[in-house]
Image: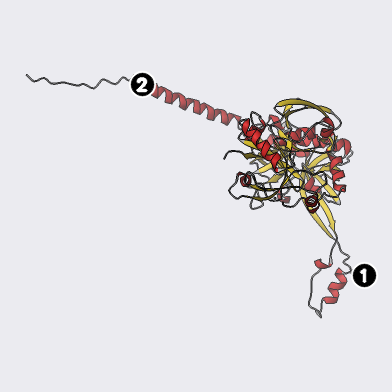
């Protein structure tokens, strides 16, 4: 008797398909709500805002007198019929050029008080003999320079007028978010008052300076916009338009405005003192790498490592090269850039607590801050110390040589200088990958001074015995110190 196995396909329930359809419908509705919300948040027009702030935005025209030179005069063939004419026109009584050239430059600015204080960029007015301010109303006034800060490219001007002047308030750049609407107002390419709109593309950008804190925006910024304001939607200045990134010289949607939080602090000092007064620790610092942190027993690469302690506040407080600054004035220090800005903003003559990581534990120091500008002025008056050229032995891929009096004299080093001179570095070594060069001077290993190769080898062995994979060395190149973590693994 034959039997047949009959298989039947189970009926598919409609419930999963219904759930899928409902889910897709819900996603669609949510996305539509988000789009609708974005449409609601987008301003229909910037006209009211532009009308409100424009009276306080100014065009700036500067005039600079440049001495003419003989090289500037046209050269004509000897015997030319115009030779005598051009000689009389360009040469003075003693055969010198007597017609200096007057160059004009354009920029923007904004009024921050009804008594006529105006903010712009330092590069707009630098070297100017005359500064002319044109207001939105057509009023024109001459301006005097109150003070400048090249480090942040900020300048403060002052105009006098019988009536109170329209001005705009500062805003909090820290409260601004990436994606927020902004408008830039200024005098692009000398075309007169102009408004452009965009969003904040990024925050906390650094270009070149130690105190950089730029807002990046895609609002069109061109030559002539420099020094003008970047406004939030409340009509507050959250940035000073300063620079653009462009291969063509025109706007490609990458513009930078110095954060109002930086600019306001600078402006306050310029208004009170005519110059900046930044705090100064008196140390050289560098960021930590993961290997450097591991080499000194720090859990993660944070803080700012002290590479050198100069005569001044930190030396008086007992800070040492090799200390890692973790906290400054009750605030965490993530990296060197954060520390530089916070020290600069902390003021002069204040006692601040500095927490450093030293020999596996945290140490609290009290530092009385000095004034950076005074230190820089003194440094300019002092002749630069001689730089140390290259020198040699053999360990961790480096050929090293111990210092003696003859070598110190040859290299221009002081009699008290100790350490090992790098004579050569193997191409495929970890030292070469870390950027060590012939001529570098190694002065410490694992935060201990070294005077011989035996010292270096002994400290390396101690690190291995402690289970560490790296040896932290302090080297100097042209008097500039930095730490490097060298691998101890074979």
Mark 2 Cα within 10 Å, few/some/many (few <14, many 20+)? few
Q: Percent from the top left, x then y, of residue 79?
A: 81, 81
Q: Earlier in the sequence, mark 2 or mark 1?
A: 2
* Colour scheme in use: secondary structure
Placement of the N terminus among the 4 image quadrants: top left
Residue 182 locus on image (x, y percent): 67, 36
Quarter of the image for the C terminus: give it: top right
Indicate the secondary structure of the residue bearing disc 1. loop
- The vertical placement of 409 against 340, above or below, is below
| Label 2, label 1: how far apart the Cα atoms are | 100 Å
Q: Is residue 446 above or below residue 246?
A: above
Where does label 2 land, which residue? 16
Tell me the SS state at disc 2.
helix
| Residue for point 81% across, 56% down | 103
> Of 85 and 161, which appears nearest the observer?
85
- Residue 128 is situated, as x and y percent measured from the top left of the image, at 84, 51
> Farthest right residue?
93
Q: Is residue 246 visible?
A: yes
Q: Which mark is residue 94?
A: 1
The answer to which image quadrant residue 363 occupies is top right
């Amino acid at each position: 008797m034959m039997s047949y196995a009959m298989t039947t396909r189970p009926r598919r329930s409609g419930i999963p398909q219904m759930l899928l359809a409902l889910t897709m419908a819900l996603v669609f509705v949510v996305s539509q709500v988000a789009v609708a919300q974005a449409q609601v948040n987008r301003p229909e027009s910037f006209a009211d805002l532009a009308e409100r702030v424009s009276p306080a935005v100014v065009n700036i025209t500067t005039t600079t007198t440049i001495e003419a030179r003989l090289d500037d005069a046209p050269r004509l063939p000897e015997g030319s019929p115009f030779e005598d004419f051009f000689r009389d026109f360009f040469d003075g009584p003693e055969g010198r050029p007597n017609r200096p050239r007057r160059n004009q430059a354009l920029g923007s600015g904004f009024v921050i008080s009804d008594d006529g204080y105006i903010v712009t960029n330092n590069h707009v007015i630098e070297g100017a003999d005359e500064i002319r301010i044109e207001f939105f109303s057509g009023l024109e006034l001459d301006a005097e320079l109150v003070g400048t800060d090249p480090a942040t490219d900020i300048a403060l001007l002052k105009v006098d007028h019988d009536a109170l002047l329209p001005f705009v308030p500062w805003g909090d750049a820290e409260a601004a978010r990436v994606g927020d609407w902004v408008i830039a107002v200024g005098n692009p390419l000398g075309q007169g008052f102009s408004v452009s709109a965009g969003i904040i593309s990024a925050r906390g950008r650094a270009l070149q300076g130690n105190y950089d804190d730029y807002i990046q925006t895609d609002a069109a910024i061109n030559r002539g916009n420099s020094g003008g304001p970047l406004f939030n939607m409340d009509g507050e200045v959250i940035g000073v338009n300063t620079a653009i990134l462009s291969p063509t010289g025109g706007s490609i949607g990458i513009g930078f405005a110095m954060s109002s939080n930086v600019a306001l602090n600078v402006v306050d000092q310029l208004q009170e003192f005519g110059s900046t007064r930044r705090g100064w620790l008196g140390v050289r610092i560098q960021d930590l790498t993961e290997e450097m942190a591991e080499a000194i027993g720090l859990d993660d690469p944070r803080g700012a490592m002290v590479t050198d302690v100069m005569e001044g506040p930190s030396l008086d407080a007992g800070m040492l090269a090799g200390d890692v600054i973790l906290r400054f004035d009750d605030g965490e220090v993530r990296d060197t850039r954060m520390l530089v800005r916070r020290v600069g903003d902390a003021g002069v003559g204040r006692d601040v607590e500095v927490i450093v990581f030293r020999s596996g534990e945290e140490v609290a120091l009290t530092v009385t801050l000095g004034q950076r500008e005074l230190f820089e002025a003194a440094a300019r008056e002092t002749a630069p110390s001689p730089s140390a050229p290259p020198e040699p032995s053999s360990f961790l891929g480096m050929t090293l040589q111990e210092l003696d009096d003859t070598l110190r004299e040859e290299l221009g080093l002081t009699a008290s200088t100790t350490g090992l001179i790098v004579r050569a570095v193997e191409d495929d070594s970890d030292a070469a990958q870390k950027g060590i060069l012939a001529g570098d001077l190694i002065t410490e290993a694992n935060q201990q001074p070294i005077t011989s190769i035996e010292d270096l080898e002994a400290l390396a062995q101690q690190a291995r015995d402690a289970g560490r994979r790296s040896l932290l060395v302090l080297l100097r190149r042209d008097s500039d110190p930095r730490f490097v973590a060298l691998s101890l693994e074979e």
